[in-house]
Amino acid sequence: MIEIKHLKQRFISNLSPNYGVDESIELFWMSMEHILEIIPRLQLKLKQSVNLSESQQSILNYILSELQTGRPIQYILGYAWFYNQQFVVNEAVLIPRPETEELVSLILNENTGNNLRVLDIGTGSGCIPISLKKYLPKNSEVVGIDISQDALNVARLNADILACSVDFIQADILKEGTLFMKADQKFDIIVSNPPYITPKEKLLMHSNVLEFEPHVALFVEEDDPLVFYNAIADFAIKNLSLTGKLYFEINQLYGDQIIAMLNEKGFQQTQLKKDMGSHDRMISAVLV
């Protein structure tokens, strides 16, 4: 038997210079949950010691060594939790964030009708459309698009694992040829968490994000930070239903600019909403 406090202290000693003590402890518990398959965590915290097999000790050593390189634990374990579901993730997709869960909750709270058609632009791991498909009425139709075929492979795998029927399409929203649907098909909901980080903001980001997460899903040019929001808004004007709604996750630095852009394009009822950290994070708008 190995005392848990000794294992935890090993994580703190090796990781705290880069992660700090609190995050090192969180990484330790995540690692132990994974190895021992113990959920909820309270069951694990009540234990004083654990009996780890040689294989389990090897896995724990591997996780710790990978964490020391800065690699995010979600990529090491191969999954991340989002909206009470476990999603496969790898370096082809962004790691789902809690703020995006708030965006999903907003959409679910505001849209309770039947026969909804939903489009997620820049779908990544598929966490947004799959979560919406799971909790919207069963007759809802959900589509996700992404420029990256590798990301779509992950999204399709997640849809299969979670038994959700979502249609995934490779498309570039910045190109006019993205008009992939039939002329008579409109969406009731268009949602996107597009790239929105400018190069100057890199200095504020943790190195494990910069070195391991896909830049194509993170960054925009300094001189055109709203490029995706503009393109998606133009797309929505042509492809939203008469009562359809547009939802964005945003960079908190550009909330007012995005609202002004949407108003200029004719959107109405534009609302800027804060996340759990009181940062401007979500925007919703309608055309009518």
Image: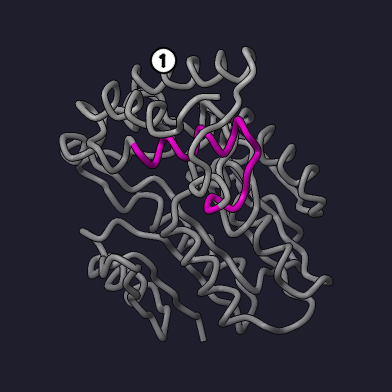
Residue at figure coordinates x 34%, y 64% from the top left: 281
For residue 175, above or below residue 51: below
Residue at figure coordinates x 42%, y 20% from the top left: 64
Residues 94 and 246: in front is 94
For residue 288, above or below residue 280: below
Residue at figure coordinates x 39%, y 58% from the top left: 230
Applied colour scheme:
one colour
Find the magenta span and give its range.
25-42
Residue 256 in the image: state x and y as whole percent.
23, 70
Task: Say if the magenta span includes residue 39.
Answer: yes
Residue that badge 1 annotates = 65
Residue at figure coordinates x 46%, y 54% from the top left: 193
Residue 190 in the image: state x and y as whole percent.
57, 65
SS class of the residue under badge 1?
helix
Residues 8 and 79: in front is 8
Mark 1 closeness class: few <14, some 14–19, many ≥20 residues within 10 Å: some
* Residue 142 found in image quarter: bottom right
Task: Say if the magenta span includes residue 125.
Answer: no
Residues 170 and 211: in front is 211
Residue 94 in the image: state x and y as whole percent.
48, 39
Give the total number of marks visible in the rendering: 1
Amino acid at dot 1:
Ser
* Residue 15 found in image quarter: top left
For residue 10, above or below residue 48: above
Magenta stretch, main secondary structure, is: helix
In the visual, does 56 lie left or right of 181? left
Is the N terminus in the top left, top right, bottom left or bottom right quadrant? top right
Residues 66 and 129: in front is 66
* Residue 44 found in image quarter: top right
Residue 5 in the image: state x and y as whole percent.
38, 33
